[in-house]
Amino acid sequence: MLLVLDACRLDLMNEVGPEYRFCEGIGSFRSLGSSSLQWLERNFSPDFADEMANTTYITGNPYSEQAVQESDFHAVDEVWRYDWDEEIGTIQPRSLTDRAIHHWRNNQPEQMIVHYMQPHAPFINHDLQAGISPDSWEELYTGEKKNVWMRLRDGEIPKQTVWEAYKDNLRAVLDDVELLLENIDAQSVVITSDHGNGLGEHGIYGHPSEIDSDVLRTVPWIETSATDEETYDPQTQSHSAEQDDVKSKLADLGYL
């Protein structure tokens, strides 16, 4: 099982990870991309066709619409399509955890990738990003409203305030990773990220594509395992909901 924590910096994990028993031995890995789309395109390629065919991919990242072909995988569950939290403009980690446990217990896939959206902004418990609504996403890029990285760049919020919110977002997803690891059986589990996130290093804010920078490309790598102690029963979700606008969801997450 591969657990992808979207936009997780290595130093962020080094600071927060020791709070969790399963985060022992935090290592590093060089990602193939500096953005989610780039990471998806370079990893989910014909070179890995055999691996993908045996893999169930569960994702909260809307870029799957552009870069993931369902026929390439054993199964694809785009949870963002039917369980998006409109109030905060992202998908809660529990939605991914529930679907991962469901698939693991009911379908017993040979391999599984779970792509969580946290610690990627918006920050669940901090109101630092304005305009978190699919109906007003364009305002984030017209100057009427700004995402958190634009506000940091322009000196509207202190870097330490952003860093503390960023850490809390990592804790939010690691809490769910802990729950997941207690409710599946997996001899080998890796926790990593698709890319990091710039907080002003070399003028980088956020995570633009095609940037070969350590702050964006060097990500955490943690090896652990999981045992199903049956401490939790996942909530079932309806898949019949009408698909929402993908562009709106990407903008909520801070993409152009």
Image (cartoon, helix red, strand yellow):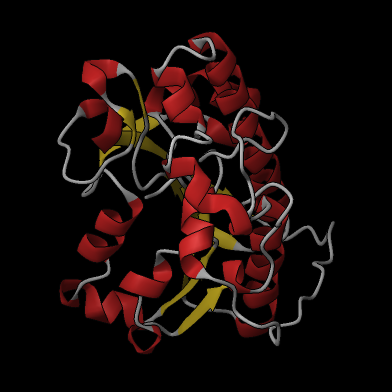
Quadrant in the picture for residue 150: top left
- Relative to the observer, which residue lies in front, 107 or 193? 193
- Percent x, y for residue 196? 36, 35
- Percent x, y for residue 251? 48, 52
Residue sitting at 61 percent across and 24 percent down? 165
Question: Seen in the image, is 256 located left or right of residue 59?
Answer: left
Quadrant in the picture for residue 202: top left
- Residue 91 against residue 100 in the figure, above or below: above
Residue sitting at 50 percent across and 33 percent down? 146
Quadrant in the picture for residue 106: bottom right
- Relative to the observer, which residue lies in front, 193 or 233? 193
- Percent x, y for residue 233? 84, 66
Please count the marks in the image.
0
Question: Seen in the image, is 52 located left or right of residue 161?
Answer: left
Residue sitting at 72 percent across and 65 percent down? 98
Q: Is residue 243 visible?
A: yes
- Residue 158 against residue 24 in the figure, above or below: above
